[in-house]
Image (cartoon, rainbow, N blue to C red):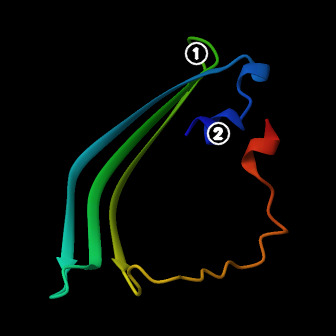
């Protein structure tokens, strides 16, 4: 989160930011096959984020977000060589370069 919020460069604007992240209900479900290898996993969680940007006593901005996230993963190969093909990322800028 520091990389993301650091790219905002609020210091140069004379502003401070407070951030609070709350992890609510969180559960993981694992499915193991008859060969005792992991076959799939599901993660479900509730996440709340609150941001507050302060310039001075009169100029403040707050933002709140609540998220329900579900992530499903399927294990296609276990113990075998796996090839992962990524899309062309040459047009994207690394966020750490923005600092």
Quadrant where the N terminus sits is: top right
| 12 left or right, relative to 39 | right
| 6 left or right, relative to 92 | left
Crowd tier of the residue under label 1, counting other residues whose Cα lies within 10 Å: few below 14, some 14–19, many 20 or above: few
Q: Position of residue 98 (x, y in %)?
A: 80, 41
Residue at 77% from the left image edge and 52% from the top image edge: 94
Q: Are marks 1 and 2 in contact (CB under 8 Å)?
A: no
Mark 1 and mark 2: span between their CA atoms? 28 Å
Crowd tier of the residue under label 2, counting other residues whose Cα lies within 10 Å: few below 14, some 14–19, many 20 or above: few
Mark 1, secondary structure of its residue: loop
Q: Which mark is residue 20?
A: none
Residue at 40% from the left image edge and 87% from the top image edge: 76
Residue placed most toward the observer, 33 or 91 = 33
The residue wearing badge 1 is 58
Q: Position of residue 83 (x, y in %)?
A: 59, 83
Compared to residue 8, the image places residue 93 above or below, namely below
| 12 left or right, relative to 70 | right
Compared to residue 72, the image places residue 9 above or below, namely above
Compared to residue 40, the image places residue 24 above or below, namely above
The residue wearing badge 2 is 3
């Amino acid at each position: 989160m520091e990389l993301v919020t650091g790219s905002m460069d609020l210091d140069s604007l004379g502003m401070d930011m407070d951030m609070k992240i709350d992890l609510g209900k969180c559960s993981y479900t694992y499915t193991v096959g008859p060969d005792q290898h992991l076959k799939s996993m599901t993660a479900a969680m509730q996440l709340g984020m609150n941001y507050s940007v302060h310039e001075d006593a009169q100029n403040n901005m707050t933002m709140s977000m609540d998220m329900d996230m579900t992530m499903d993963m399927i294990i296609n190969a276990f113990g075998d060589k796996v090839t992962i093909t990524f899309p062309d990322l040459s047009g994207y800028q690394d966020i750490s370069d923005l600092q």
